[in-house]
Image: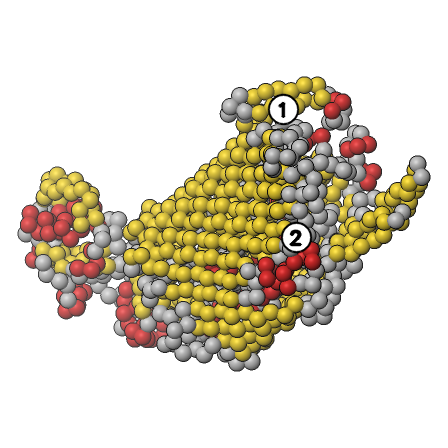
């Protein structure tokens, strides 16, 4: 087999096309390497092929030709490849990769210099009087200094103006995907960033495009792409220790302005290591609270309120498996290990169609893939917790294992306190995570994640509380071709809690609760053309809820056993969305999700009189359902529409509309999330929650992305919100529908974010003005709260201000500050008292008519990094922080108690004094 040399190319241009061959041949192949096919043709004919071996690597051919002209055969087998051909004299066939072969030069090839420059700018294919792309790229001497990559197959005529380039970015040393890396098109200033798996996608005009890569810890690169068609290119980047300060910002360059989605927040995991948080813990979810539109009911509160939504309206995913309670120790710490997390994206405006089942937000958390090249890790030691993550290559460049664990040793703090009750208390938690990543081949990979967290505590009580999360997920990624890919996910998530009471009476007991969720999702992505990209698929999940079992503890206990029947439900959905680029300014993302829920037997449903309140007096009877029999079905369409319009290349306006359905509810009469909150499925008596949200925002970048500015407003309406009656018993209640109410909600707000991404001083200012209201109105007095009028929700806090600032004195020394101000949350106060039967009682105001005092807090930290030598055992990082520097005694709640015949008010606080912390981190 001969190879094509440069003199042969020159002779090709000089001699032109050879006389067309007339010989006919018969060949047949099934999934055969192209080189073998060409060898067979040479042996069956008088023709010889000239090419470079690497052009044909990996190309397989399936064909069947009988008594067919050889030119037709060659054209057929090369039709769907990037290879062109030309027949020359003496039965020679010359192959070229990507570029067309021209038998004559354009008329003005040796013409005026300015004419050539004009042709070069237009980057057009040969039309008889313009320079071909293949010649343009070869004439530019400066392109020899950068890598030149040709994508696709050049055509003589082409009406398509732009194509899609996509691929994966990984580190050359370890093969790991690089997330949040910027790819910038120099000609237009536009670009994109890689996702958590290192994948990227760019729309590029036909012709030459110079693409830069910029990312944290990796050398900048520049590649000249000559685009003929849609294609794939994978980057492998060298590490760099000199670009730490400048690349963090570039990873988000223009993303906030360019994407069509509204209300998207991305937490950069690397940046939060300098934020002064409580007890020195790096905490992704706590850092999210500093962004606009995300809040909690109070300091140390568990659960998150997003844009006026309830805590149960957030879908929290870890590698696409559900985490029901992502909190340790009453919410003081989150249960997500920051060292094992690669990215955190929060959707609070427009929610992609693949996600469903919650109304307010999606927290999409992705764990790291292990290092496939060398053993590495990261660890930290703090005053109350220790944390370590190891990355272990199993097969170099192919598979890896990441394992991480975190545990507390906080009991010593409780025992050191000057309080006898607290000295007898205990509090412990831990979480572990493991992720296996396997690259099977170029088109197939799998990821498997396992996660477990456990909490147990007993603080000044006779009860021991424990709760746990368990998650397992596996994902198969398959690339059919350059335009079609599939992601298939299976997961199993469970959450459970227990209470063990051991008092001095004979009422000792054990209580257990558990819910379990099994889910599957198949998502396809298809690039139809440069203007249309489709995301579509199906999803389903099976709920199995054990509402509770109570058993006596010990032989002398007088507690009777009680078990509430299990609940089961099946939720299914189909979804489709189209990202449509109408023109250079307008980008649309419109989709539809249709979901269906069925409450399943076995079970018993209580039937009540119509037009009457639900209570024991209106109970008409019960109806029993067999195993897997449909008790009640609900469903409906969920629209997801958003649009972005460029007012300038760095200034855009966006709008979106979402509606959703949620079939699962929490049962709680606490202000904030509690480990003993239970989940209730929709059934015959309780309808699913529904919501619709409209958003409108302006997004502007200044100084090439150095500053980001956004202003976004929203309005949300909700139906069938689950609330409780006064004095309701929610735990271990068989007739729970008699203790709850369903009402309407509305929320609206304005969110402002100003962010400086780089420089010695960087950080952000986030402000939200938001209101959240509930209305519980029924036909009967017991179903009506506050006269059936809207009243503030428990988490309605109109003003929320966060300022996060980092100042870098040198590459090793920096300081950080965090300031928070929030309006006090609503409470119900006593407004009078009265006597009845010689006893004094309290009369309370309307629900949530008053507020506790406003909240504010200042935190400071000083950070010291180790030296930046390349060759050393580990890179260290010290953080000295003070939480609540001002010693503000912020109220967590205000409550009232009757003592000695008088009503007294009390205030509880979580951290009422400054809390200093020293934390040591190291990475190897």
Identity of the residue furthest to the front in this view: 556
Instruction: From the viewer's perspective, tell me whether residue 107 is left or right of residue 380.
Output: left
- On the image, the x and y values in percent for residue 14 come to 16, 66
Residue under label 1: 605
Q: Is residue 439 visible?
A: yes
Residue under label 2: 459
- On the image, the x and y values in percent for residue 709 come to 61, 65
Labels 1, 2: front one: 2
- On the image, the x and y values in percent for residue 884 come to 68, 67
Q: Is residue 544 above or below residue 309?
A: above
Residue at (48%, 38%) from the top-left corner?
Answer: 518
Residue at (88%, 49%) from the top-left corner?
Answer: 900
Q: Where the N terminus falls, by quadrant?
A: bottom left
Instruction: From the viewer's perspective, tell me whether residue 638 is left or right of residue 856.
Output: left
Quadrant position of residue 116: bottom left
Query: Could you say which is closer to the camera, residue 210 or residue 576?
Result: 576
User: Which mark is on residue 219?
Assistant: none
């Amino acid at each position: 087999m001969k190879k094509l040399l440069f003199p042969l190319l020159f002779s090709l241009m000089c001699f032109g096309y050879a006389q067309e061959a007339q010989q006919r041949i018969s060949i047949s192949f099934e999934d055969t390497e192209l080189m073998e096919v060409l060898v067979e043709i040479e042996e069956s004919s008088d023709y010889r092929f000239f090419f470079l071996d690497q052009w044909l690597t990996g190309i397989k051919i399936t064909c069947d030709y009988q008594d067919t002209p050889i030119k037709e055969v060659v054209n057929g087998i090369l039709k769907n490849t990037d290879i062109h051909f030309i027949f020359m004299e003496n039965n020679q066939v010359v192959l070229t990769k990507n570029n067309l072969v021209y038998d004559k030069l354009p008329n003005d090839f040796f013409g005026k210099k300015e004419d050539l420059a004009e042709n070069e700018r237009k980057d057009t294919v040969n039309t008889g009087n313009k320079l071909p792309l293949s010649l343009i790229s070869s004439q530019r001497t400066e392109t020899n200094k950068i890598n030149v990559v040709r994508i696709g197959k050049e055509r003589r005529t082409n009406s398509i103006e732009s194509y899609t380039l996509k691929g994966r970015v990984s580190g050359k040393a370890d093969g790991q995907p690089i997330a949040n890396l910027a790819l910038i098109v120099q000609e237009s200033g536009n670009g994109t960033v890689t996702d958590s798996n290192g994948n990227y996608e760019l729309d590029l005009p036909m012709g030459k495009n110079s693409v830069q890569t910029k990312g944290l810890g990796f050398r900048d690169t520049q590649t000249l792409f000559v685009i003929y068609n849609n294609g794939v290119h994978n980057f492998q980047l060298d590490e760099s220790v000199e670009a730490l300060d400048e690349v963090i910002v570039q990873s988000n360059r223009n993303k906030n302005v360019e994407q069509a989605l509204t209300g998207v927040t991305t937490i950069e995991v690397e940046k939060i290591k300098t934020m002064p948080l409580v007890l020195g813990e790096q905490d992704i979810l706590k850092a999210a609270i500093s962004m606009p539109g995300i809040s909690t009911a109070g300091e140390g509160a568990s659960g998150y309120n997003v844009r006026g939504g309830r805590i149960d309206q957030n879908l929290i995913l870890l590698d696409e498996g559900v985490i029901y309670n992502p909190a340790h120790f009453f919410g003081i710490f989150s249960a997500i290990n920051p060292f094992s997390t690669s990215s955190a994206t929060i959707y609070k405006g427009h929610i992609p169609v693949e996600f469903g089942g919650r109304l307010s937000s999606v927290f999409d958390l992705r764990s790291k893939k292990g290092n496939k090249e060398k053993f590495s890790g990261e660890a930290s030691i703090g005053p109350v917790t220790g944390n370590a993550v190891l990355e272990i290559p199993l097969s170099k460049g192919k598979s890896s294992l990441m394992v991480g664990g975190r545990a507390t040793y906080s009991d010593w703090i409780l025992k050191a306190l000057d309080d006898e009750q607290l000295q007898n208390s205990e509090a412990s938690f831990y979480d572990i995570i493991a992720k296996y990543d396997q690259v099977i081949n170029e088109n197939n990979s799998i990821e498997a994640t396992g996660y477990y967290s456990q909490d147990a505590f007993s603080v000044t009580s006779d009860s021991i509380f424990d709760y746990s999360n368990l998650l397992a997920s596996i994902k198969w990624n398959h690339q059919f071709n350059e335009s079609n890919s599939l992601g298939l996910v299976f997961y199993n998530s469970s959450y459970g809690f227990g209470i063990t009471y051991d008092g001095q009476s004979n009422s000792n007991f054990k209580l257990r609760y558990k819910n379990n969720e099994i889910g599957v999702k198949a998502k396809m992505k298809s690039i139809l053309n440069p203007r249309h990209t489709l995301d579509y698929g199906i999803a389903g999940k099976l709920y199995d809820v054990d509402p509770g079992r109570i058993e006596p503890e010990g032989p002398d206990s007088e507690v009777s056993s009680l078990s509430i029947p299990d609940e089961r439900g099946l939720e299914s959905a189909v979804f489709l969305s189209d990202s449509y680029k109408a023109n250079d300014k307008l980008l649309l993302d419109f989709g539809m999700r249709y979901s269906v829920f069925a409450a399943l037997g076995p079970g018993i449903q209580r039937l009540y009189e119509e037009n009457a309140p639900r209570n024991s007096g209106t109970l008409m009877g019960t109806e029993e359902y067999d195993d897997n029999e449909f008790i009640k079905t609900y469903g409906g369409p969920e629209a997801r529409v958003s649009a972005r319009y460029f007012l300038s290349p760095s200034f855009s306006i966006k709008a979106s509309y979402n509606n959703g359905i949620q079939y699962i509810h929490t049962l709680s009469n606490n202000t904030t999330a509690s480990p003993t909150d239970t989940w209730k499925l929709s059934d015959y008596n309780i309808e699913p929650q529904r919501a619709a949200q409209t958003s409108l925002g302006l997004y502007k970048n200044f100084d090439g992305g150095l500053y980001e500015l956004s202003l976004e407003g929203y309005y949300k309406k909700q139906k069938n919100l689950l609330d409780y009656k006064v004095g309701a018993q929610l735990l271990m209640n068989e007739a729970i529908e008699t203790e709850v109410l369903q009402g309407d909600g509305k929320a609206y707000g304005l969110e402002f974010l100003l962010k400086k991404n780089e420089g010695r001083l960087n950080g952000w200012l986030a402000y939200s003005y938001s209101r959240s209201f509930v209305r519980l109105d029924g036909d009967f007095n017991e179903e009506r709260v506050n006269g059936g009028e809207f009243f503030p929700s428990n988490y309605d806090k109109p003003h929320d201000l966060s300022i996060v600032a980092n100042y870098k004195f040198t590459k090793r020394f920096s300081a950080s500050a965090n300031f928070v101000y929030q309006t006090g949350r609503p409470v119900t106060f006593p407004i009078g008292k009265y006597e009845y039967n010689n006893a004094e009682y309290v009369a309370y105001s309307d629900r949530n008519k008053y507020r506790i005092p406003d909240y504010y807090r200042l935190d400071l930290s000083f950070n010291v990094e180790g030296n930046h030598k390349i060759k050393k055992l580990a890179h260290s990082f010290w953080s000295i922080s003070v939480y609540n520097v001002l010693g503000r005694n912020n109220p967590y709640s205000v409550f009232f108690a009757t003592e000695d015949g008088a009503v007294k008010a009390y205030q509880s606080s979580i951290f009422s004094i400054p809390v200093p912390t020293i934390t040591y981190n190291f990475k190897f």
